Amino acid sequence: MTATATLTRHAPDNADSRVVDWVDSIAELTQPDRIVWCDGSAAERQRLLDEAVAAGTLIRLNPEKRPNSYLARSNPSDVARVESRTFICSEREDDAGPTNNWAAPAEMRVTLTGLFRGAMRGRTMYVMPFSMGPVGSPLARLGVQVTDSPYVVLSTGTMTRMGADALAQIGPRTEWVPAVHSVGAPLQPGDADVAWPCNETKYIVHYPETREIWSYGSAYGGNAILAKKAFALRIASKIGEQEGWLAAHMLLLKVTNPSGRAFHVAAGFPSACGKTNFAMLKPSMPGWTVETIGDDIAWMAPGPDGRLRAINPEAGFFGVAPGTGHSTNPTAIATVQSDTIFTNVALTDDGDVWWEGLTEETPSHLVDWLGRDWTPDSEAPAAHPNSRFTVSADLCPSIADTWDDPAGVPIDAVIFGGRRATNVPLVAQARSWEHGVYIGATLASERTAAAEGTLGELRRDPFAMLPFSGTHMADHWQHWLTVGERLGRSGQAPLIFQVNWFRRGEDGRFLWPGFSENSRALAWMTERIEGRADAVDSPFGLVPVDGAIDYAAAGVSREDWDALFAIEPEALSAEADDTDVFLARMGAKVPAAVMRQHAEFRARL
Ligand code: GDP
Ligand code: PGA
Ligand code: MN
Ligand code: MN
C-alpha cells in the first residue's frame, strides 16, 4: 500500500466511493504529504486561521477594531484574474468560440499532468465538497475541489456552502463537478515556505464536456476559488445551455416601493463596474428599500409558474475594497466590521485595515499592500486597486430573508451595464427581449483592475461574460433568445434595461453621482414594469421623459442631465462601425435576431 492510499482512509465514512477514488487519483498524481477532508465546521475554520497566522499567510487584525478578521498580502504578481491563462478546452474549438483561449483537451491534459505531477509535495491537500446554491435546492449543484492552499480553503468556506452537508448530498448517481487546484509550489524536505506560494506559470483550465476544472499556479480568488468563476459561470454556462437555464455574471436584488410592492432585479456589469455596490444600494429616495440577494452570480431558470426564477449560488461576497466607504457603500462597510479576510489592502498603525476611499481623511502612516511603509506622499496607492474583502453573505445587514430561498426569486427586470465615459445613456429600456439581447451582446466597458490588462481601454464584454463564458459567445446569445421566447410564451419575460453610472463630462468628471442616487434609475425601471412611467424612443431604446426622474434632487444640473442622454451621431456611428467588426469576429453563429437589431440601431441613428 502506498503512503497516499493510507492517507485517503481518512475520508469520512459516508463519502461516495467515486469521490474517494477521484481524491485518491489526484493524490497519486500530486503527492501531498497529508490529506484533510474539510467538514466546514467553525472549529476547523479556526484551526486553519490559526495555522495561517502562524505561517505568516494571514495577519490577525486588532480584535478591538476588527474582530475575527485577517489581512493577506499576496505575491505582488498574483493580484487578479489571468484571462490570458484561462482556457476553455472543449472537444471542438468552435464550441469555445473566438473570445476564449482554446487548446485541444488531450494536449492540455498532457501539459497539466506534467505540471501537477508532484505539485503538492510537502503540502497538505484539502478536500472541499461544496454546494452552489442552498443545499438541496432544485437549482443547486454540487462540486468537490481539492487544493493545497489553506487561504483557498478559508475563502471557499466563506464563498460556498462547504463541508459535510454538501458531501452528504453526493450519492452514487449525483452529478458533481471535480476541481483540482494547486499553487504549484512543492516543498522539498527542509524547505521554508513563503507567505503566499504561487508559480509564475499559471493555467486556469475548463473541460466543458466532462465538466472538470484544473487550476495551477495562482491563489488569487478568481483563479483559485473554483466554485465561483470556473464552476458557477464557465462550467455552469455550458450546463445551462444544455438544460435550458441561464448562468449569469449578475447581482440579484429586491427593491420595494413606497406602496410595498416588491420587484426582483438581476443586473450584469463587468468586474469592478458596480455590482456589489448596486446589490447593497441604500436608496436616496424616501420610502424605498433595497435588499441584497447576491452580488456577482445568478443562476436563473424558467420556473413551474412560467416566470424566470433566480438563486445566488454563492454564500459570501468577494468584494472590491477601494472606493468602498461610508458615503458610497455603508452597507458593505457594516458587513466587513468583523469576520472578514482582506487581501492586499493597507494596514493601519493600530492594526486595522485601510484603502483608498474608505475614509475622507488619509491616515498619516500605513503599511501598504506590499508591506512597505506608506505616507500620503507615497506615489503608489496604499491598497492594490483590486484589493478585496471576503465575507459571509449572512453578515450583510441588507441581506433579504429570501436570499437563500431554495425556490429562488421571480425576476421582473434584467439590467446590463458597464463603464462608459461616452455614448451610453444613464438608463434605457430595451424595446423587446430581442433588443435586450442585442444590448447585452454588444455591451462594452472600460477595463478595470479586476484582471490583467490596460486600465481604461474600451473593450467588448458581451453579457459581462467575456472572461466567464464556457461556450461560444454567439451560442450564449442564442441561448438567451431561446429562453426569452419560452418566457414570452407565458407572457412573463422580464423587461430588459441598460444603465451607465460612469458617463463623463468634457472636464472628465462623472456626470452622475452614482451609488445611492442610482435608486432613481431603479425606481423608474420599476415604474416601467408597473406601466406608470412614460418613456420616449431613442437609438438606445426607451428613455425617461422629462420629469420622470428627479435629477435635481440628486444634485444634478439640467445641463449634466441632458449630457447624460446626449446623442452624438458621429461617435455613435463610429460605435456602430466597431460593432460591425465585433459581430464579424463572432462569426457565422451570430443569431439573425442580433444582426436584425444591429441594422435597426443603425437605421435609428
Ligand atoms: P463589482 O466588481 O462589479 O461588484 O463592482 P463594485 O461594486 O465592487 O464597484 C467597483 C468600483 O466601482 C468600486 O471602486 C466602486 O466604488 C465603484 N462604483 C460602484 N458603483 C459606482 C457608481 O454608481 N458610481 C461610481 N462613480 N463608481 C461606482
Ligand atoms: P467582481 O468579481 O465582478 O465583483 O469584480 C470578481 C471578478 O469578476 O473577477
Ligand atoms: Mn465578478
Ligand atoms: Mn463585486
Image (cartoon, grey):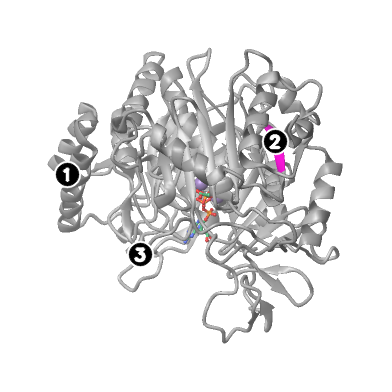
Viewer-nearest residue: 77 or 293: 77
Indicate which disc, 2 or 1, sits on the residue closer to the N terminus. Answer: 2
Secondary element type, mark 3: loop
Amino acid type assigned to the residue bearing label 2 in the image:
Met
Q: Is residue 313 left or right of residue 302?
A: right
Q: Identify the magenta region.
A: 125-132
Q: Measured from the top left, where is residue 107 in percent x and y?
A: 39, 37
Indicate which disc, 3 or 1, sits on the residue closer to the N terminus. Answer: 3
Residue at 45% over, 32% down: 207
Q: Is residue 269 left or right of residue 478?
A: right
Residue at 15% over, 57% down: 570
Q: Is residue 334 magenta?
A: no
Q: Comparing marks 3 and 1, which lies closer to the viewer? A: 1
Q: Measured from the top left, where is residue 497 in percent x and y?
A: 38, 39
* Mark 2 residue crowding within 10 angstroms, few (<14) / some (14–19) / many (20+): many
Main structural element of the magenta stretch: helix, strand or loop?
Answer: strand
* Mark 1 residue crowding within 10 angstroms, few (<14) / some (14–19) / many (20+): some
The residue indicated by pointer 3 is 504
Q: Measured from the top left, where is residue 278 in percent x and y?
A: 53, 48
Q: Comparing marks 2 and 3, which lies closer to the viewer? A: 2
The residue indicated by pointer 2 is 128
Secondary element type, mark 1: helix
Residue at 63% over, 27% down: 22
Amino acid type assigned to the residue bearing label 3 in the image:
Arg
Q: Could you tell me how far apart the alpha carbons at marks 3 and 1 are, in whole angstroms?
A: 25 Å
Residue 92 visible to the viewer = yes
Amino acid type assigned to the residue bearing label 1 in the image:
Asp
Q: In the picture, residue 134 is in which quadrant?
A: top right
Q: Is mark 3 within 8 Å of ligand 1?
A: no
Q: Could you tell me how far apart the alpha carbons at marks 2 and 1 are, in whole angstroms?
A: 45 Å
Indicate which disc, 2 or 3, sits on the residue closer to the N terminus. Answer: 2
